[in-house]
Amino acid sequence: MASVWVGSRGTVKDFPGFSAGRDADAVRKAIKGLGTDEDSLINILTQRSCVQRQLIAKEYEAACGKELKDDLKSDLSGNFEHLLVSLTLPPAVFDAKQLKKAMKGTGTTESILIEILASRTSKQIKEVGEAFYTVYGKSLGDDISSETTGDFRKALLFLANARRDESSKVDEHLAKKDAEILYNAGEKKWGTDEDKFIEVLCLRSFQQLRLTFDEYQKICNKSIEESIAGEISGHLEDLLLAIVKCARSTPAFFAERLHKAIKGAGTDEYTLTRIMISRSGIDLLDIRAEYKTLSGESLHSALKSDTSGDYEAALLKLCGGED
């Protein structure tokens, strides 16, 4: 089993007194009874940690001879179905499916590729790559290569190859050097050397990048964000700015994405579901705090006013509390 992605700032924790057999049985009754007992499904699947949900799915399959996700699919519909089915998947498989969906059919949903690849750790991306290969029989890199182009593709491949340094050591000398490299590659010359931006932003650890951004500001009298916005355009600009945001504060990055998904023209439930599920075991408490700072209202009340029915009930459980 792949490692679990757990952070100390998640809203969903291990459920005390957990029994996979008992939960699997309750889930089976909720699905198989006369009419589906949605409340039961919500109470169990949104209140068990990721590891516990995997164990329930295993027990369920052993007892029923069918996969839990398939039974949920045939019994539920819409956003609620997508949410509960996604909760039963291991995180790396969930990400792999989101990436595949972003590259399927005509046109690529670049914002999903950017969100996932900019925010995950190298270790997580390695697991996503393995899951992608297991599920689809081809490498994530191959799909990215055939669905994207140019410098954007180059940067995505850097990220998909999980080459970002994960050590917590920071090197002041390197930060100064990288800041000079970025300055020389952009503001200081006519035209931009995108490769240098890609290398520094896709290879250095987030801690290291924060130091580099401070040094950059000193040399340039401009923030790295201003320079990227002025020097680079299109999807590459979006990706590099997302990396800078994640390096500065991953919870703030997700709070902004959630705000856009909820407050944009029409709710983007797909993004809402993805972020709530993928961060509920990691840092959703911090995202909630950032959301409130950003929008002036709590994530809880934003979800309440923007979603409805079983989907709303499940999201509010994942959200945890009112801020």
Image (cartoon, helix red, strand yellow):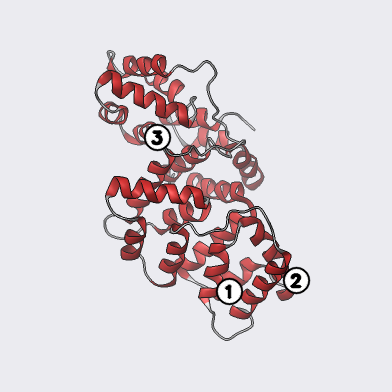
Quadrant, the C terminus: top right
- Tag 3 residue: 83
Cβ atoms at labels 3 and 2 below 8 Å apart: no
Give the number of the mark in front: 3 or 2. 2
Q: Residue, x 50% and y 62% (percent of image)? A: 239
Q: CA distance from mark 2 to mark 1?
A: 18 Å
Observer-nearest residue: 136 or 71?
Answer: 136
Residue farthest bottom in this picture: 190
| Mark count | 3
Residue 114 at x, y = what percent?
46, 57
Could one spot residue 296 in this view of the protein?
no
Cβ atoms at labels 1 and 3 below 8 Å apart: no
Q: Looking at numbered disc 3 in the image, what kind of residue is underneath it?
A: Leu
- Tag 2 residue: 218
Residue 95 at x, y = what percent?
41, 46
Q: Does 291 sit above or below residue 184?
A: above
Res. 86 image quadrant: top left
Observer-nearest residue: 133 or 253?
Answer: 133
Dot 1 or dot 3: first in sequence order is 3
The crowding category of the residue bearing disc 3, from other C-alpha atoms within 10 Å (few below 14, some 14 to 19, many at least 20), is many
Res. 64 image quadrant: top left
Q: Does 29 sit above or below residue 268?
A: above
Q: Residue, x 48% and y 47% (percent of image)? A: 124
Q: Does 55 sit above or below residue 218?
A: above
Please, what secondary structure does the residue beneath circle 3 have?
helix
